[in-house]
Image (tube, rainbow, N blue to C red):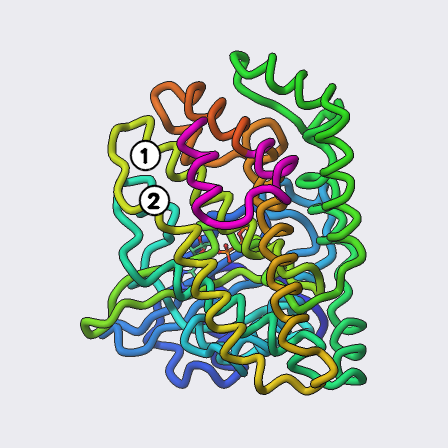
Amino acid sequence: MGYRILETDDIPGYLHERGHWPDVTDIHVREVSDGNMNRVFLASSTDGTRSVAVKQALPWVRVAGPSWPMSPDRADAEARAYDQIARVAPDKIPSVHGYDPENYALVMEDMSDLEVLRTLLNEGAAYGPDTSARIGELVARLSFATSDFGMDSASRKALIAASVSPELCKITEDVVLSEPYIEHEHNHWHQDLTDLASEFRADTRLRTEVADLRHLFMTSAQALLHGDLHTGSIMVGEREGTPVVRVFDPEFSFVGPIGFDLGLYWANALVSEERARALGRLTDHADQLRLSWEAFEREFRALWPTRVDTFFDDAYLDRFLRRVWTESLGYAGTEIIRRIIGFAHLTDLTTLPDPVPASRRALLLGRELIVRRAELTGPQEVRVAVEQG
Ligand SMILES: Nc1ncnc2c1ncn2[C@@H]1O[C@H](COP(=O)(O)OP(=O)(O)OP(=O)(O)O)[C@@H](O)[C@H]1O
Ligand SMILES: [Mg+2]
């Protein structure tokens, strides 16, 4: 029948046809799209015992409409990432009930009982002891399993080929890893940050370091990434007294440098910390980079004895993890900067009564993380850089 764009009223019939919903007389559907890119619908039965979420990629950017075309293949990338994560960390993503490649539509677990982490943090909530550790574990499991340590060489080459995602990678290469450092129509910032934005554009050392991270992003096929692991791609809550952490929206997934996933998470945690500092309500913000790194490292080391290629010895593991650490810091820096003087900004800062002091601190920290990433050898050194800001 071909690709059809689903509207709210089409969802009952669609779910029935696809075998996800037996009784179309008992279904309530609402659209909850709040991102830029895709449509999301929630469907539930009257008594609430049955519910699912439907996410469809349109052939354009949702908020822009047909004037900004974008391949719906991003839904394939999302389905592929969920498929890989489900093998190693099924409790950390929504369960996927089915993917329909003809309509670029994913039917998955309804997580509306959970809350987006960014929303909670912006409201003043603490992370709690679990969230960052679960994120570190997820990155370790996904990246180990899809690296040359967890997968035989031929299967890896097939995964790399299948996961090539030129359009979405190009967005990151431009929006995150170059535009903020040049004059570009996408860039915008608070008028009181003009001096720093100009200073960053004129900073040739910074630019060369960003070029290094950008080239690494383009060429380093270490493992399958989530690709957009910010606090708006994480839901948290509690089910039957147990903390739940779910990562979603992996449409930017491709095989790239592991540090990109950790770095995005760290950047968002550090910006959230600056928001809390500005409002005088710091909680456990300072622990999050360390907790996620320690969990990542612990899990990666625990998996190491299962590696498929033992030519990679224990000394190599130490070297590899050190590199991932350093690269993660660099990517964290680029994510902080682009979220303040680049295209898409963060509500963490934009909703502050005065976003300027927190934004300045964050921008300067971002630059430190990029240019001094080789000297910042552990979470404690990063803490010093944050506190000195
Ligand atoms: N499985 C789900 N259950 C409940 N709500 C969901 C689910 N998936 C998505 N949502 C809601 O829809 C919103 C948008 O989802 P998502 O981030 O996946 O879409 P997107 O268009 O890719 O967003 P972005 O433009 O940020 O990339 C989420 O913030 C969340 O509120
Ligand atoms: Mg998305």
Q: Is residue 385 magenta?
A: yes
Q: Which mark is residue 16?
A: none
The magenta segment is 366-389
**Horizontal side of residue 143 vs 347, given as left or right:** right
Decide: is 152 above or below 120: below
- Across and down, in percent, residue 177 comes to 71, 40
Residue in view at x 57 percent, y 21 percent: 189
Residue highlighted by disc 2: 285
Residue in view at x 40 percent, y 32 percent: 387
- Is ligand 1 less than 8 Å from the beta carbon at label 1? no
Q: Tell whether label 2 touches label 1 (CB within 8 Å).
A: yes
Q: Is residue 57 visible?
A: no
**Horizontal side of residue 127 vs 79, given as left or right:** left
- Across and down, in percent, residue 287 comes to 35, 49
Residue highlighted by disc 1: 276
Image quarter in which the C terminus is found:
top left
Within 10 Å of the Cα at label 2, are there few (<14), some (14-19), or many (20+) other Cα atoms?
many
